[in-house]
Amino acid sequence: MPNRLTRRQMLRNTTLAGVGVWASGRVGLGKEKSPNEKLNIACIGVGGRGRSDLAGVASQNIVALCDADDRRAAGTYKKYPNVKRFADYRKLLDEMDRQIDAVVVATPNHIHAPASVTAMRMGKHCYCEKPLSHSVYESRVAAQVAAEKKVATQMGTQIHASGNFRRIVELIRAGAIGPVRAFHIWSRKGRGAGDRPKETPPVPKGLDWDVWLGPAPYRPYHPCYVPHDWHYWWDFGGGSLGNMGCHYYDLGFWALGLRYPTSVEASGSPVHPESTPAELNLRYEFPARGNMPPAILTWSQGRKAPPIWIEKQLPGWAWGAFVGDKGILAASYPKRMLLPEKKFADFKPPDPTIPDSIGHHREWIQACKTGGPTTCNFDYSGAVTEAVLLGNVAFRLGKKIQWDPANLKVTNDPNADPYIKREYRKGWTL
């Protein structure tokens, strides 16, 4: 899979991002289904978050369930006693190729891209949890394969379907606070994991440890990884940023038409070779887009409030703040507020222009059947994921990085290459 984007592709992508994702993501399918005909869906990762995604597509035919951990998946297996089960997604896709229309991937992050890309190469529609991938390279490949195979895709940033996000985007695009030059994010939670454990307890019955590891480097089983805290180890997750970043960045990317940053710089907890930081501060620079000025996006992770929260006395409920020439728009999942309040006391918001969502999962199901658009297709959400993951690259390198998106290269440090694209363990492919 080539890494290089042509100038024409870059211009096309920038244009699509600027006008909004309702204009992109349409698929041209060879075997479109009637809206009343059910899809045959295989769910890969059916414990934890996977249970919610399975519920989101339960209106369709669930024909296969896959999880490397029978203990974690036990509740789902009990609910679907007659559905065929697998531990390894490779075996599932190989055996049930002709019976599957689409897959839902809700595994740990390091399995997201290999499972999704393998399925899409076989012509399957794909819904994948956030982040789309574990590495920047994987994210780009996933977007390219989705476009090549013309399948319907959606990343699991479910809050994108909310009415509040739509109203915030409309306010920014209508110029309510003037040209926006910065979007600040504050995530109050952050965790690291410390040193790799030295103990090597036996693998519990029901857990296929080799399959759970997938393409990641081999390491002995330990309960500090499974079922949840894999998030805080570089081999499997991306820390608190990797866990939540796509949800937060999504709002800024959507409202401001962002695509690829030109630079990223980071600071925070001491860099650890194995585990993720508890505190992390990031600053991205994005170029001008159409009539929008260059923009800064910042991520602040930890209990200490970012300077702008203190300086502007932003409300405690807000995790996001758009800063424009005429004011500030404070944001969270359910709330929004224009500041200063006195200045906007008589402000009349623009009429809604972005259609309400039929539901994040339903949107994807409909696209699978009709070839219609999705709002978090892999072209759009792949760029969001890339930005999130580049924050971790900058942190691990300990320097401000200059980013060349066309060639997937950090131009000022060749040591970045293993963080952009890592080697897979033998037997696993993208």
Image (spheres, grey):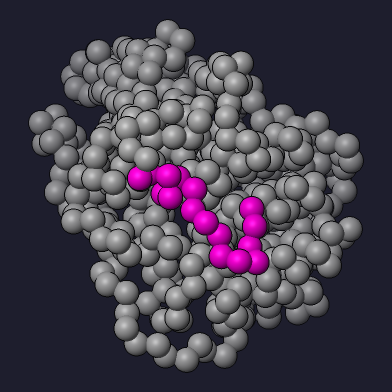
Write down the quadrant of residue 403 in the picture.
Answer: top left
**Is residue 191 highlighted in magenta?**
no
- Extreme residue in the left direction: 311
**Residue 118 drawn at (x, y percent):** 70, 54
Camera-nearest residue between 190 and 216 = 216
- On screen, residue 298 versus residue 38, left or right, reads left
Camera-nearest residue between 43 and 366 = 43
- Identity of the residue drawn at 41% across and 81% down: 223
- On screen, residue 354 versus residue 393, left or right, reads right
Say above or below: 404 vs 221.
above
- On screen, residue 92 versus residue 143, left or right, reads right
| One can see residue 254 in this view | no
- Identity of the residue drawn at 66% across and 30% down: 25
- Extreme residue in the top direction: 291
- Extreme residue in the front direction: 414
**Residue 171 drawn at (x, y percent):** 40, 20
- Identity of the residue drawn at 70% across and 34% down: 147
**Is residue 418 highlighted in magenta?**
yes
- On screen, residue 379 versus residue 368, left or right, reads left
Camera-nearest residue between 427 and 32 = 427
- Identity of the residue drawn at 80% across and 60% down: 61
- Magenta range is 415-430
Say above or below: 299 vs 295.
below
**Residue 95 drawn at (x, y percent):** 83, 67
Write down the quadrant of residue 5 in the picture.
Answer: top right
Most common SS among magenta residues: loop
**Residue 285 drawn at (x, y percent):** 32, 26
